Amino acid sequence: MGEAFRFVDLGPQDPFQAFGRMPVLGTNVHEGKGPIMTTSVWGATHLNVGWFDDVDATLDLERCQELGVQVIRRPVYGGGTAFYEAGSAVMWSWLLPKEAHPDLDAELTRFQPVVTDALQRLGLEGVVFEGSSDLRFNGRKLGALTGQDVVLCNSVGGFINNRPPDLDTYLRVVRIPDDKFKDKAVKDMREYVVTAEEIRGKPLPYKEFRDALVAATEAAGFELYDEPLTEDENRGVQKIAGKIARDESVRRISSDRFRAQAPAGSKVGFGNEKGRKLCRAGVAVDGRGTIVAAMMAGDMHVGPPDVIDRTAAALVGADSADETDLRARIASVFEADDVHQADGMMGVTTDDLLKAVQKAVAEAR
């Protein structure tokens, strides 16, 4: 008998439900009630911003408001900003106790064959992993599988685009840094994203996806038992969803706010560094060249969730011209034993963050 997972079929969900449910279910895992597997599909059109993203660098929030496009920041989950129409992407997760499953790389390796099997069952045999994360078809992105520390537990989860969204709306509100896709085979977002419907030549209903993933999970030796959300769990979801909906959550990392709150008399600059992932830094430098405020952001999957904020805080007080000190300050946080990211070879490095900071300093000067 394999490891037993509670299976929760969440079905269609709006972004507030989606990200309100994860802390509730994560608490159950943390409290020793066992691992949980979920499947779901977006039930509402929206944009969701990664936990570390600078929202002003990725989206025109005023334009979003004009067009009535809902924006939400994913609590603790990294990655970039994404646009989803209702029904345009299906999702899944395996929530794991940290004590029994501490190694994110090992968990990604364990679940990759499950995802590959499910894709084959769906007629998506040509889809392959690039690194441990991206799911690609002829160089185009279908979805992703990521491993993350989500505080209460570890998570291995992903999504696939099952039908084409209305990218015209997305392209009216998105801001893409010039170098974000410099190493991508496809430059235009319309060509960069591929969907299961395009590959299969027919629609991919949510139920077909769910059943294929369940079958692949059970075929890999995992035992699943159905258990929907309880009334108490649903009440917890609604409470958390209300907090996620607040504007301060969306603007948690905001270059506009950083600029407005910079100490009087300082000069502000921002810089992007595209290594394996996009890193972004903002600095406020006083007349002596000292960093008096700092902001770090980017498209990345790294834990714990406060690590990038702590990295920014460590820069305050540094001589902006002292490369050795800047690197040491970043490394003191980012290379600590409590910091981890799955597939380090495809992740963010201290030097990536340093280069972003140096570019921000150069702009401030």
Image: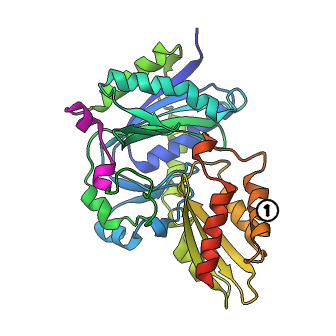
Q: Quadrant of residue 67?
A: bottom left
Q: Quadrant of residue 24?
A: top right
Is residue 299 highlighted in magenta? no
Picture residue at 72% right of the left edge, 90% below the top:
287
Magenta segment: 189-203
Name the spot of residue 26 as percent of width and height, x first.
60, 37
Give the vertical position of 74 relative to 293 (above or below).
Answer: above
For disc 1, the neighbor class at 10 Å (few under 14, some 14 to 19, many from 20) is some
The residue closer to the viewer here, 282 or 208, is: 282
Assign the C terminus to one quadrant of the image: bottom right
Q: Is 91 displayed left or right of 272 in the figure?
A: left
For residue 141, side relative to residue 109 (left or right): left
**Residue shown at 34%/28% (left/top)?**
209
- What residue is at 65 percent from the left and 53 percent from the top? 349
Determine whether 336 is above or below 264 in the image.
above
State whether residue 306 appears in this view: no
Residue at the disc numbered 1: 328
Q: Amino acid at mark 1?
A: Ala
Q: Is residue 199 magenta?
A: yes
Q: Is residue 7 above or below residue 84?
A: above
Here the colouring is: rainbow
Q: Position of residue 216 (x, y in %)?
A: 43, 19
Q: Residue at x 46, y 44 (%)?
A: 18
Question: Residue 128 or 206: which is nearer the viewer?
Answer: 128
